[in-house]
Image (tube, rainbow, N blue to C red):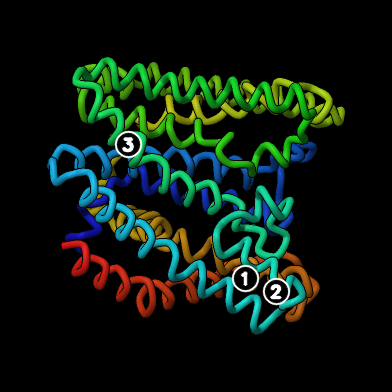
Amino acid sequence: MNSLKKRNFGLDLLRALSIWLVLLQHAGINIPGLKPMKIGTIGVEIFFVISGFLIGGILLKSIDEKKGIINTLKNFWIRRWMRTLPLYYTVLLFKYIVIDNSIGWKLIYYIFFLQNNLHHGPSFLGVSWSLVLEEWFYLFCPIYLLFLNHFLKKRNQIIFFITLFITSIVILRTRWVLIENVSFDNVNAYFPYRFDSMFIGVLLSYLNINKPLFFSVLKSKKVFIIGLLLFISYLFFYWNLAVNNLINKTYVPRTIGFFILPFSIGLTLPYISTLKINFYQNNLKKIIFYYITWTSLLTYSIYLIHPFIYNYFIDNKKITNIFLLNFISAIIITYITSYLIFKNFENPILKLRDKISS
């Protein structure tokens, strides 16, 4: 209970929202006409910004401890990869050994997170497309931040170069799309042209730690409303293009659009991170608190295993032909399975990780 109370409820709320957008989309529930983005992609975009914010904070605090470049990198990578890789490889091997091994030697793409770039789409394990971006971000981000911290002594210089990196990604992505006329789906999953989403979170984290007065301004309701309006406006703009099948004929959604969406999410994040819930007031608030917090804790396992459960209940309709019953059954089984995985697989590995990294 004490460990749950220490968590940031606002960020847990965002994380729960992101996974539910994915769950709804994969069940076939979507905003009509919002393709090829879909609401699940919006959910993943929210998670990218949160991930950059949290990982950036972890890294920046580790750098401030001045334990040396090698120790900082080693400790960060051990902790990150012991959090993400064991379950990912378990699910990957389960799919390959038990369900479908037709991919053959190309499984190696998935082992080294190259499926987006070399396999032209992670069709074998569809949800892994976002993990590719995350894992390469985990590899690159600490090196870049340590480089900046080593050569730059002023905080404003570091802020400038993080901003410059985000700008450079947008420019390089734009150049790539203009030259190659790359489709929205291919841009969406291609690293490193999507790192700006996560580095927006990193920039926010740096401001939170090193420019608290400025970050307190970003926490205001006014900035939150601006971000929310920008978010809604861009989705409306995108939807107007999507319903007319103009996404892959228009440059904006494939270039600057990939910056506008996470930027708008980033503007809402500081205010949302201040949200709290007093679960001592009544049982309803206590239920909401536990549900949101545990959904956030189970997000990773839910994300990886729900496609298998959906395939049984929703896609193949093994229980009934009634969609609502199939959907509810799939959600319940997904949550139960994810909880068991967290308690009996992820949590023991996290405890081992803490021992190793300490």
Mark 2 falls on what kind of element?
A: helix
Q: Nearer the viewer, residue 101 or 220?
A: 101
Measure the C-alpha gap from mark 2 to mark 3.
36 Å
Residue at horizontal 55%, vertical 75%? Answer: 333
User: In the image, what residue type sits under mark 1?
Assistant: Ala
- Residue 330 got which mark? 1
* Residue with the mark numbered 3: 273
User: In the image, what residue type sits under mark 3?
Assistant: Ser
Q: Earlier in the sequence, mark 2 or mark 1?
A: 2
Q: Nearer the viewer, residue 312 or 157?
A: 157
Q: Label 1: how many residues lie within 10 Å, few (<14), some (14-19) or many (20+)?
A: many
Residue at horizontal 32%, vertical 72%? Answer: 349
Q: Is residue 13 left or right of residue 252?
A: left
- Residue 178, percent from left and from top: 75, 22
Is residue 303 placed above or below 251 in the rendered structure? below
Mark 1 falls on what kind of element?
A: helix
Residue at horizontal 51%, vertical 64%? Answer: 302
Residue at horizontal 37%, vertical 80%? Answer: 344
Q: Mark 2 near mark 3, Cβ–Cβ under 8 Å?
A: no
- Residue 334, percent from left and from top: 54, 70
Q: Is residue 79 left or right of residue 84?
A: left
User: In the image, what residue type sits under mark 2?
Assistant: Phe
- Residue 347, percent from left and from top: 32, 72
Q: Is residue 329 left or right of residue 76?
A: right
Measure the C-alpha gap from mark 2 to mark 1.
6 Å
Measure the C-alpha gap from mark 1 to mark 3.
30 Å
- Residue 313 got which mark? 2
Q: Mark 2 near mark 1, Cβ–Cβ under 8 Å?
A: yes
Q: Nearer the viewer, residue 5 or 303?
A: 303
Is residue 236 visible from the viewing direction of this image? no
- Residue 22, percent from left and from top: 60, 52
Is residue 319 placed above or below 34 in the rendered structure? below
